[in-house]
Structures are given as structure tokens and as C-alpha cells.
Amino acid sequence: MPKIIDHDKRKQQIAVATWKVIAEEGIEQATVRKIAQATGLSAGALRHYFSTQSELLLYSMNLVSERVKERTMSKTYQGDPIDLIKEAISELLPIDDERRLEMEVWLVFSVKTLVDEKLRALSEDVYLEMKEGIGTIIQLLVNLGMLKEECDPDEEAVRLHVLVDGLAMHHLLHPVSFPQQKMMDALQYHLKSICTF
């Protein structure tokens, strides 16, 4: 009886192997041969799933975004509103090995978007989704009567978006000087500066 292969699952395994090659060796080393080795497949089998390297990178980049969305949407948020907001924002920060790998790969992909139009279009879509998600967080604070009166919701959404990107990048690039606790303390300090609690 022939072995049944879950092609979607296999594509995800290839994408995760691609992330690991990129994180450990750089995007220049994310060749079909190297990724095939990391997955235990032949180069020909890998091409069965992705006919070009660009197609593989696009799928891999999209998978990062999809995983963040899945985690965010699958959670049940209950409890103190500020803790819930910190928890939601933490989905966008490198607070554990899984999210750290995703953020490292996303940072590398982001540089690649400067020269690859297909990746640039996906990056723009994800940027807009993140902007909208952070805007929703600020609107939640408004709806709960927790955003300080002097704060402009639109400007605060922009500021929080920039802060989240900066926190993630500083922690990834300088983990000793800017450890996870410092990253989370900075987020807490910012939320205190705009919230009434």
C-alpha cells in the first residue's frame, strides 16, 4: 500500500527547515541543496513542492505570518485588560525559542524584500495587518476607557507599532544588553504612560 503524504504538512516542514538554515547560516545559504539536506529530501523531491527558490522563500515568509495569526486567534483572552494587551503584543515579540526564530527569519526576509518584489508585496500586506492589529489594541483601550484623554488613538497606534518593532529588533540584535526582561519592562512602562490604571 503506497504511503500517504500530507503535502501541506510537508511544505510546512520544508519551510521550517528553511527558517533554520536562514537563522543559522544566512539567507545566502538557503539553497535548494542545503534545504533538501536539512529536510532529508532530495533536491528533486524539494522541487516537487517548490519549483523555484523565490517560491520557497515566499511560502516560508508567509508561514511566519500565518503562525503568528493562528496563535493570536486561537487564544482565549481573559483577565486584567493590561495583562491581556501585553500578552497579545507578546505574540509579536521574540519571547521564546519559537517566536525568536520567527522574528530572526522575518528580519532576514525583510532585508530581502528590498530586492524581491514578490516578497515586498507580502511584507507590505503583513505590515498593514500588524498596523491594523495594533490599532485594534489601542481602540480596545479607548473602548474600556483606559486610554488617557490627552492621547490621540491614531498617533498612539503608530507609536506602539514602532515601539514593538524596535523592542523586537533591539532584543534580537543585542540580547545581552537588551534582554527579554528589559524588553517586557519597556513595554510595561510605555503602557503605563498611556493608560489609566
Image (spheres, rainbow, N blue to C red):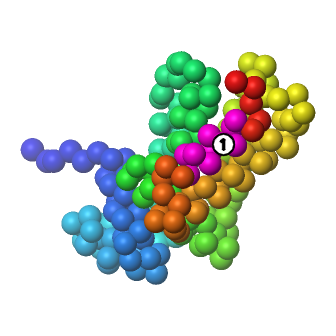
Where does residue 176 sit, x and y in percent of width and height?
46, 65
- Nearer to the camera, 21 or 55: 21
Residue depicted at 49% across the width and 22% down the height: 76
Vertical position of residue 3 compared to residue 193: above or below: below
Q: Give the amino acid type for the residue marked by disc 1 in the picture.
A: Tyr
Quadrant of res 38: bottom left
Where does residue 104 sit, x and y in percent of width and height?
49, 63
Q: Residues within 10 Å of mark 1 (few under 14, many from 20)?
A: few
| Residue 184 appears anywhere in the view | yes
Which portion, as a residue range, is magenta? 183-192
Residue depicted at 69% across the width and 37% down the height: 191
Badge 1 is on which residue?
Answer: 189
Magenta-span inclusion, residue 195: no
Quarter of the image containing the C terminus?
top right
Which secondary structure, mark 1? helix
Residue depicted at 40% across the width and 49% down the height: 96
- Nearer to the camera, 151 or 117: 151
Residue 135 in the figure: left or right of residue 30: right
Number of on-image labels: 1
Vertical position of residue 191 compared to residue 10: above or below: above
Magenta stretch, overall SS: helix
Where does residue 39 sit, x and y in percent of width and height?
26, 64
- Nearer to the camera, 98 or 65: 98
| Residue 102 appears anywhere in the view | no
Vertical position of residue 131 compared to residue 82: above or below: below
Where does residue 3 sit, x and y in percent of width and height?
16, 47
Magenta-span inclusion, residue 186: yes
